[in-house]
Image: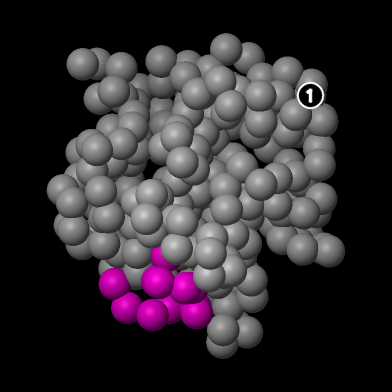
Amino acid sequence: MNVTIIRFPGTNCDLDTANAVKKVLGIIPKIISCKDDKIPKSDLIIIPGGFSYGDYLRSGAIAAREPIMDDLELRGNQGVYIIGICNGFQILTERKLLPGSLLKNSSLKFISKNVELKINRNDTFFTSKYQTDEVVNIPIAHHDGNFFADQDTLNSIEDNNQVALRYLNPINGSLNNIAGLYNKNLNILGLMPHPERAVDIKTGTNDGSRIFESALNFYST
C-alpha cells in the first residue's frame, strides 16, 4: 500500500500524520510538496492539518490553487482514495472536491479538545473497522470548522448518505453536526477531527487508528 502526504506552507501535522501511518500501518509514507506537479503512485493521499498560508483570505483557499491540486483532482476523479484532515478538509471544499464550506466556529473561538463523534456508516474504505452509530473519541483543533451548505446541498448530502461522522453534541455550529463528509463516490473524505492524534491510548484515545486500519483492511481482503 502506497501512501502520500502533501505538505503546504503552514502545514503542521504532516509529521504527526506520517508517524501515525507508520505506527498503525507499518508503512513509511512519501511526503511531497504542494509545488510539485505530480503525485507518485498512491493508494491513499492525505492532506494533513495545519494553517496553509496562515489561513489568509479563507482557510484552504490559497492552497486549493497550488500546482499539485490539478493532479490531486485528477486522481480523485479516477477513484484514488483521498483524506483531508482539518485544514485538508477546508482545502478539499475550496477545490470543490467536497460540497459545502467551513466557516468560523459559531463561538468565534479556537476549539482544541477531545470530542465524542458518531460514526454514520461503516461500509466505506475509511470506516470498515468501526460500527455504524458507534461513538468514538477523537480530538479537534480548529477555528474554522463550522460546516455550512445551502439547503439544497445539505439535502443532497443527507439523501446520498455522504456524512461520515457527526459531533455527538453541538460543537462549532456545523449544520446537522457534520464533522466529516464524503464525496458522492465515497473515495474522498474530509474531516475536522484529527485521527492522527488518536492512535495511541497513552495520549488518551486510539479511536482514530481505525480510520487507517480500515484503509489497510481494504487492501488485505
Amino acid of disc 1: Asp
Whether residue 132 is situated above or below residue 33 in the rendered picture: below
Relative image position of residue 171 (x, y in whole percent): 43, 78
**Residue at image point 60% right, 23% down:** 75
Q: Is residue 60 left or right of residue 45?
A: right
Residue that protrudes farthest toward the bottom in the picture:
107
Question: Is 10 located above or below residue 123 in the figure?
Answer: below
Q: What percent of the width, then of the height, locates residue 83?
A: 50, 39
State yes or no: residue 104 in magenta. Answer: no
In the rendered image, which residue does mark 1 sit on?
A: 36
Residue at the farthest front position: 152
Residue 35 x, y percent position in the rendering: 82, 30
In which quadrant is the N terminus drawn? top left
Foreground pick, 22 / 133:
133
Would residue 47 be found to the left or right of residue 187 on screen? right
Residue 174 highlighted magenta (yes or no): yes
Q: Residue at x 49, y 43 (%)?
A: 183
* Nearer-the-camera pick, 200 or 141: 141
Q: Which residues are magenta?
A: 168-179
Residue at 25 percent of width and 48 percent of height = 121
Q: Quadrant of residue 77?
A: top right
In the rendered image, is residue 115 in sight?
yes
Image coordinates for residue 145, horizontal then vertical, percent: 56, 68
| 205 or 90, nearer to the observer | 90
142 with respect to 216 (left or right): right
Colour scheme shown? one colour
